Image (cartoon, rainbow, N blue to C red):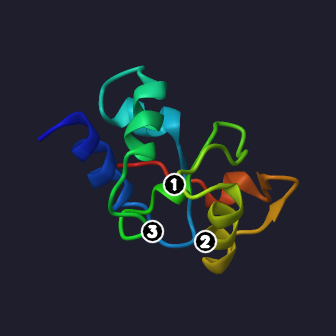
């Protein structure tokens, strides 16, 4: 399985209405290659089935999405996630950490 496929598989574990971070994904994969995680997400051909829109930075800010930040925001809000000024509201209560 390629690195990208491992990233996409992890994204599928994130429950609807929750988000995770580039850093958390990388750590779960045993790497510090946070940018490589972002690159894998950008190449995700299975969005939104593989919910790469649920990945944000470590402070809860929305960043890059192949379909644009407006679409990312809409997808997250449709899952009940509140966003203000491109940042997840109540971030600590919606963050998902893998077991």
Above or below, 99 relative to 35: below
Instruction: Please give the residue where the numbered disc 2 appears in the rendered image.
Output: 75
Give whichever of discs 3 and 2 has the lower sequence position. 3
Using the rendered view, name the quadrant where residue 36 is placed.
Answer: top left
Q: Are marks 1 and 2 in contact (CB under 8 Å)?
A: no
- State whether residue 83 is above or below residue 5: below
Q: Nearer the viewer, residue 59 or 69?
A: 69
Question: In what quadrant of the picture does the N terminus appear?
Answer: top left
Judging by the rendered image, the residue that carries numbered circle 1 is 96
Crowd class of label 3 (few under 14; some 14 to 19; many from 20; radius 10 Å): some
Instruction: State the residue at coordinates (56%, 58%).
Output: 67
Q: Secondary structure at mark 3?
A: loop
> Quick check: 23 above or below 93?
above
Q: Position of residue 83 (x, y in %)?
A: 79, 62
Q: Residue at x 63, y 68 (%)?
A: 76
Do the residues bearing badges 3 and 1 touch, measured as CB atoms within 8 Å? yes
Q: Mark number for residue 15?
A: 3
> Could you tell whether 70 is left or right of 18 in the image?
right
Q: Looking at the image, which residue sits at the far left?
A: 1
Of badges 1 and 2, the one in the foreground is: 2
Farthest residue toward the right?
85
- Considering the numbered disc 1 on the image, is that residue within a helix, a strand or a loop? loop
The residue under the point 68% across, 72% down is: 74
Kindly identify which numbered label has been placed on residue 64: none
Estimate the x, y position of residue 97 in percent, counting from the top left: 47, 48
Query: How many numbered marks does the figure carry?
Result: 3
């Amino acid at each position: 399985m390629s690195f990208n496929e491992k990233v996409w598989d992890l994204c599928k574990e994130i429950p609807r209405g929750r988000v995770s971070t580039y850093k958390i994904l990388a750590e779960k994969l045993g790497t510090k290659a946070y940018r490589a995680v972002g690159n894998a997400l950008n190449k995700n051909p299975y969005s939104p089935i593989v919910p790469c829109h649920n990945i944000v930075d470590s402070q809860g800010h929305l960043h890059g999405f192949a379909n644009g930040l407006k679409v990312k925001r809409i997808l997250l809000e449709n899952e009940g996630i509140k966003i203000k000024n491109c940042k997840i509201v109540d971030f600590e209560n919606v963050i998902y950490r893998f077991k």
